[in-house]
Image (cartoon, rainbow, N blue to C red):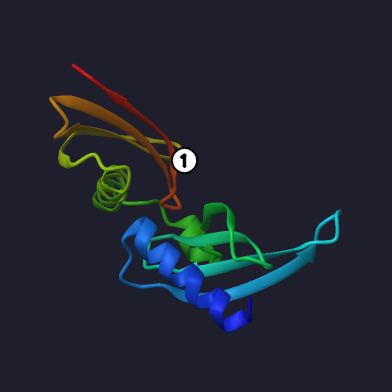
Amino acid sequence: MTQEALLEHLIAYAREFWDLSRCELIETSHEKTWWGGRRGVFVFDVGWPKARLALVVRERDGKVLDHRAIAHPTPRALLTPLSEEEAIEVARRECERVHYWFRQPVRASRHENGWTIHTNILCMGANATLGIDDTGVVIGRHFFRR
């Protein structure tokens, strides 16, 4: 797979999987695996408040092996705590990503390194609790039926 075709494939994958309107390549790195294959890491700016999307890809066929939200590398983004509104927006996007319809936040609790958002979701009266760190990355989620 050529580099241009691989990049187009990854942008289409990211836009479809996370329903993104913005997806700009920032950096790439490549490494050889112990069995002789090649892996690439592609980092995209996708408009998240304080994080970027990293995709680990097998270069020969473009298969996405792993995806992670990584902290935005600027010191200001790491030092500025996430606001309550930003945390609620991250929780809403995460619920929609896993096909639970976010209805409203019930309670937002601030902790030393992030937020816990308790919400109602439109799934037969279920509730959700999401943990979000100060970089805007979801570090835990639980969905509860009533």
Q: Is residue 109 above or below residue 77?
A: above
Of 32 and 116, nearer the camera is 32
Q: Residues within 10 Å of mark 1 (few under 14, many from 20)?
A: few
| Residue 16 x/y as whole percent | 35, 62
Seen as rendered, the residue at the extreme top is 146
The x, y position of residue 75, in whole percent, is 54, 64
Quadrant into which the C terminus falls: top left
Above or below 136: residue 16: below
Residue 41 lies left or right of residue 117; in this view the side is right
| Residue that carries the numbered disc 1 in the rendered image | 113
In which quadrant is the N terminus drawn? bottom right
At horizontal 62% and vertical 80% (from top left) the residue drawn is 3
Q: Which residue does the image show at 53% across and 52% down from the upper left?
A: 68
Residue type, label 1: Asn
Q: Is residue 114 left or right of residue 126?
A: right
Q: Secondary structure at mark 1?
A: loop
Residue 130 pos. (x, y %): 34, 35
In percent of the image, x 22 and y 26: which residue is there? 127
Residue at 85% in and 54% down: 35
Q: Nearer the viewer, residue 35 or 31?
A: 35
